[in-house]
Image: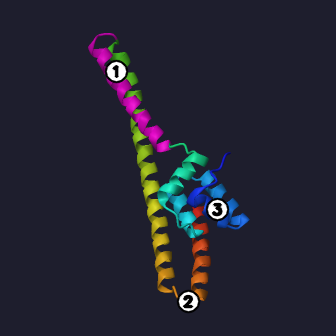
Amino acid sequence: MVVKTEGPVHSFLVSLEQDRREAFTTYVENTYSIYEIWLYANVLGYTGGFTALDKWVLQNYPKLNRRELMLAEIVKLEADIDYLRQQVQADIVKPDAAATRIAHLSKELRGHVVEVEKMTRGTDRRGLVLAGADKVMRELKSIFKGNDDVVNALELAYESVWAALAEEK
């Protein structure tokens, strides 16, 4: 895999200790959500922009967009059902034969819709939890900005919380 060697993400990776860099790149490789990747990068001290990280991830660790594939499949199923109905109206396919096939396609379509809704709800809920945890930790660090001991302890707690949330997948 060719890894981009310039920009804010590269600078961030170079600044990490070897074990954290490996943990981060492994996480990026195995995680589909760019939002989770961005939050984890922020936990580790990434200060660059979201867009730069998104481009870096897409360039170095391309992701399969399962939700997009399911949505495309829904559109195809709808077209298949419409086409079959048109064939029935044109007397090309007998209505009784088409009814079974339409029922099967409709059931498959409903299953795809339910699956997309689950994916969306799960991603949204997880993203909100992670974003909330990130916001809380940033606010705490901001409150104790002048006290290095507390800020260091909060950073360790931040990483521990992140690790626990990441394991809940």
Where does label 2 land, which residue?
147
Q: Residue at x 46, y 79 (%)?
A: 139
> Eyeballing the image, is 2 above or below 43?
above
**71 inside magenta stretch:** yes
Separation of disc 2 and disc 1 at Cα?
68 Å
> Eyeballing the image, is 78 above or below 46?
above
Where does label 3 land, which residue?
13
Where does label 1 land, which residue?
83
**146 inside magenta stretch:** no
Q: Which mark is residue 15?
A: none
Q: Foreground: 154 or 47? A: 47
Q: Residue furthest top?
A: 92
Label 1 is placed on what type of residue? Tyr
Label 2 is placed on what type of residue? Asn
What is the quadrant of the C terminus in the image?
Answer: bottom right
Circle 3 packing at 10 Å, graded few (<14), some (14-19), many (20+), is many
CB of mark 3 within 8 Å of CB of mark 2? no
Earlier sequence position, callout 2 versus callout 1: 1
Secondary structure category for the residue under label 1: helix
Task: Work out whether residue 61 can be spotted.
Answer: no
Q: How many marks?
A: 3
